[in-house]
């Protein structure tokens, strides 16, 4: 039984990119990289599946990022307003005691 090789995610991603952009056959690329043709085909399939799922996740993530940015900005304004009110209350408390 042949020993199974473990490849990094970066290697897998680069192999898929090479297969999609080089204009060479998948068989040639698999041989050059020292991976089996079926492994390369499986990686390409996984990459396509992730690409199909990514836009829906991406849109939701982008909406959440925009909302988070808006809320952080609003939170900072509220903190500043609270700080101003604290200072005003302190000032008027001192003025009232004179």
Image (cartoon, rainbow, N blue to C red):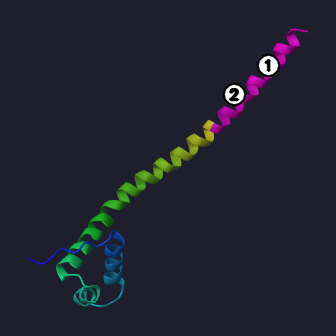
Q: CA distance from mark 1 to mark 2?
A: 12 Å
In the image, 8 versus 88, the foreground residue is: 8
Q: Could you tell me which residue is drawn at 25 percent across and 91 percent down?
A: 28
Q: How many marks?
A: 2
Residue 32, position in %: x, y? 28, 89
Quadrant of the image for the C terminus?
A: top right
Residue 37, position in %: x, y? 19, 82
Q: Could you tell me which residue is drawn at 34 percent across and 75 percent down?
A: 11
Residue 34, position in %: x, y? 25, 85
Q: Could you tell me which residue is drawn at 23 percent across and 82 percent down?
A: 35
Quadrant of the image for the N terminus?
A: bottom left
Hey, which residue is sitting farthest left in the picture?
A: 1
Q: Could you tell me which residue is drawn at 71 percent across and 34 percent down?
A: 80
- The vertical placement of 71 against 35, above or below, is above
- Residue 42, which numbered label? none
Main SS of the magenta segment? helix
In the image, 36 versus 75, the foreground residue is: 36
User: How crowded is the residue under tag 2: few (<14 C-alpha within 10 Å), some, or many (20+)?
Assistant: few
- Left or right? Give the position of 81 relative to 41: right
Is residue 59 highlighted in magenta? no
- The vertical placement of 23 against 84, above or below, is below
- The vertical placement of 19 against 63, above or below, is below
- Residue 90, which numbered label? 1
What SS does tag 2 mark?
Answer: helix
Is residue 87 highlighted in magenta? yes
Q: Which residue is mark 2?
A: 82
- Left or right? Give the position of 17 relative to 62: left
In the image, the segment drawn in magenta is: 76-98
- Indicate which label's residue lies in the foreground, 1 or 2: 1
């Amino acid at each position: 039984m042949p020993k199974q090789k473990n490849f990094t995610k970066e290697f897998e991603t680069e192999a898929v990119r090479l297969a999609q952009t080089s204009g060479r056959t998948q068989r040639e690329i698999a041989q050059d990289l020292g991976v089996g043709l079926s492994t390369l085909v499986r990686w390409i399939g996984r990459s396509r599946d992730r690409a199909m799922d990514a836009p829906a996740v991406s849109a939701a993530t982008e909406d959440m990022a925009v909302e988070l940015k808006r809320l952080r900005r609003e939170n900072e304004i509220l903190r500043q307003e609270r700080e101003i009110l604290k200072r005003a209350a302190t000032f008027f408390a001192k003025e009232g005691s004179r």
